[in-house]
Image (cartoon, rainbow, N blue to C red):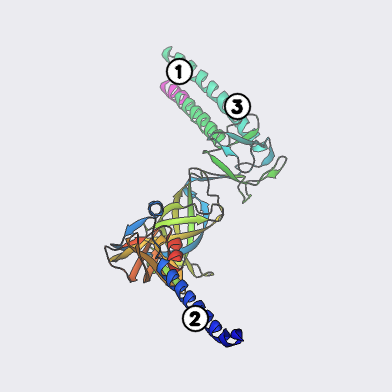
Amino acid sequence: MYNKIFMPFIIAGSACLFLFSSCGEKRVVKEERKGFELTDSLLQLVNVTAVEMSQQKDAITLTGKVSFNDDNVAKLYPLVSGNVSGIKVMLGDYVYSGQELAVVRSSEMAGYSNDLISAETNLQIAQINLAKTKDMYRSGLASMPDSLNAAMMYEQAKASLTRTKQVLKINGGGTKGDYIVKAPLSGFIVEKNVNNNMTIRTDNGNAMFTISDLKNVWIWANVYESNIDRVHIGDQVRVETISYPGKIFNGKIDKIMNVLDPTNKVMKVRIILTNEAYSLKPEMFTSITVSNQLQKQAITIPAAALIFDHSQYFVVVFKSKSALIITPVEIINTVGSNAYIASGLQVGQKVIASQALQVYNQLNN
């Protein structure tokens, strides 16, 4: 009976006790929750950078292709007809100046060899004849014109021998009917169009070998009409390739072709790059970033400080390790490692420029 009478009071009391208990738990949770703060160890890992005003740069991205430096390329065409034999190099080999590459057995070279023998013989005869004529002139048995004529014949024979030697040298210098193909400069065999036992002719339009010194290479980049006014001779460029992700090759624009390709409607610009490690190979495709300074200044921060979230750029402004403010910014553009800001920051403020995304996520949590 008593249980029936007091049961409503017991239930009501239990409900109030549960309600008060729940309210107490909420107050405890709210009081114990604290804002995110950079610990001393984490503070040593992040990079805090001051917002600065600097000369604004512009940048565009172009596509291009690695090519030979035509100033350091030698194409070896056949100077005589004949049969190729004794090829000593393969495509991609490095050769030194004067190194023998191949031999061409040629009837033309046999003719040059005969011409050399004839020229040497004629010189010996002319020399003997000159000596005899001088002796006869001193003895009164020959006249002055005879002596002068003998001297002239000797000089002609000497000139003929010199010319024959030069012709032979131009054609490889072989005296056994062989045309010796030699490298005129040091470099890589980048093209090879001959094989052993192959017959070649002087009217062949293909080079036997092409040698290139790849210590310097050219990159031909394509510039569309809308970007022509944004490239200039001397502009610094950053070149990237698929073969070497993350590796940057630095160069500059040294020539602008002031005509448009009639097929692609692009203007070509030439970039010179040093290639000491021979990393860049001809025909490689490249991505080129061209940057140049504009005649105006802008607020500048490291590009690593930017956080893109919900279609908006943010930065984390640092006041102290316990005072970190997420601030939306509007950017002008990003060039290399720098970002140029249109609004949202002031010179002198500090932003977190490394581990920014991790700090941003912690602040949002």
Say what amino acid the circle numbered 2 marks: Cys
Q: Is the magenta stretch mostly helix, strand or loop?
A: helix
Residue located 48% across and 52% down the image: 218
Which of the two residues, 17 or 224, is positioned nearer the viewer here?
A: 17
Of badges 2 and 3, the one in the foreground is 2
The span from disc 2 to disc 1 (Cα, nearest Å) is 153 Å
- The tag on residue 117 is 3
Q: Mark 2 points at which residue?
A: 16
Q: How crowded is mark 1: few (under 14 residues within 10 Å), some or many (20 or more)?
A: some
Residue 319, located in which quarter of the rendered image?
bottom left
Residue 80 drawn above or below residue 284? above
Say what amino acid the circle numbered 3 marks: Ile
Which of the two residues, 206 or 243, is positioned nearer the viewer here?
A: 243
Residue 39 seen in the current view: yes
The span from disc 2 to disc 3 (Cα, nearest Å) is 128 Å
Q: Mark 1 points at which residue?
A: 142
Residue 357, located in which quarter of the rendered image?
bottom left
Residue 178, percent across and down? 65, 33
Of badges 3 and 1, the one in the foreground is 3
Q: Is mark 1 on a helix, strand or loop?
A: loop
Of badges 2 and 1, the one in the foreground is 2
Q: Residues within 10 Å of mark 2 (few under 14, many from 20)?
A: few
- Ranked by sequence position, the earlier of labels 2 and 3 is 2
- Ranked by sequence position, the earlier of labels 3 and 1 is 3
- Ranked by sequence position, the earlier of labels 2 and 1 is 2
- The tag on residue 267 is none
Residue 176, percent across and down? 65, 29
Q: What stretch is highlighted in magenta?
A: 143-150
Residue 117 drawn above or below residue 328? above
Residue 52, percent across and down? 29, 61
Q: Residues within 10 Å of mark 3 (few under 14, many from 20)?
A: some
